[in-house]
């Protein structure tokens, strides 16, 4: 039986802040899909960028060679899918479409991800101003040491489930129907 990794992922506050930004804008059940998809995009972009800069510094011209990334188990991230492109479009009406297209481009370049990534960010149910605010939170997320982690996305998903379940328990299952806590970095038990 494998031991569960409960170490801090390093950006818990940004995850919870993102959930707080989404409060009242989409059903609580949809938070995880939005947040985990964006964290995945941010994570692979960070790992790609680190390797890209290393390849550019090496000066051998391999920075655009997909195999140079694959041999280090790093997903190749096309330019339209890089976090810099996403963050530049954060406060445009097209941000949802930009993210959906980024997910499609990543799937196209990385066949192991075919039909796996979420592509629901252009949904009319997801307010684009709110989505842009979530992108801003993740833009400021430090993922410089996450490449060493074996299961950062799994741990992120577990964190989201635990936080949402804890809050739902506190509020009697009305997670999506309440105002966000005054201190969005932690559960505010005083609201009960």
Image (cartoon, rainbow, N blue to C red):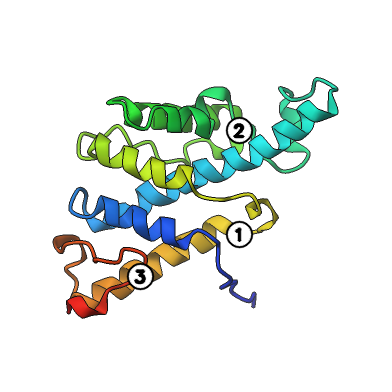
Vertical arrangement, residue 130 with respect to residue 3, above or below:
above
2 or 3: tag closer to the N-terminus: 2
Which numbered disc covers residue 163?
none
For label 3, the residue is 186
Classify 10 Å Cα crowding around label 1: few (below 14), some (14-19), many (20 and above): few
For label 1, the residue is 151
1 or 3: tag closer to the N-terminus: 1
Q: Quadrant of the N terminus?
A: bottom right
Labels 1 & 3 near each other (Cβ < 8 A):
no
For label 2, the residue is 110
Frontmost of labels 2 and 3 is 3
Label 1 secondary element: loop
- How far apart in space, not on screen, are marks 2 and 3 (Cα)? 37 Å
Which of 116/61 is in front? 61
Label 2 secondary element: loop
x and y, in percent, of residue 69 in the image:
73, 35
Label 3 secondary element: loop
In which quarter of the view is residue 10 placed?
bottom right
């Amino acid at each position: 039986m494998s031991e569960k990794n409960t170490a801090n992922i390093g950006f818990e506050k940004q995850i919870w802040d993102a959930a707080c930004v989404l409060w009242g804008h989409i059903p609580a059940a949809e938070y995880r899909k939005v947040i985990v998809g964006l964290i995945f995009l941010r994570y692979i972009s960070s790992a790609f960028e680190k390797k890209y800069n290393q390849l550019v510094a090496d000066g051998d011209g391999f920075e655009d060679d997909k195999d140079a990334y694959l041999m280090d188990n790093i997903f190749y991230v096309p330019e339209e899918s890089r976090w810099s492109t996403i963050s530049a479009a954060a406060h445009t009406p097209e941000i949802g479409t930009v993210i959906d297209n980024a997910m499609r481009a990543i799937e196209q370049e990385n066949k192991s991800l075919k039909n796996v990534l979420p592509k629901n960010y252009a949904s009319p149910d997801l307010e684009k101003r709110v989505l842009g605010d979530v992108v801003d939170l993740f833009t400021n997320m430090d993922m410089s040491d996450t490449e060493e982690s074996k299961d950062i996305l799994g741990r992120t998903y577990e964190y989201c489930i635990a936080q949402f379940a804890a809050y739902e328990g506190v509020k009697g299952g009305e997670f999506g129907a309440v105002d966000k806590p005054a201190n969005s970095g932690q559960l505010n038990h005083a609201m009960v």
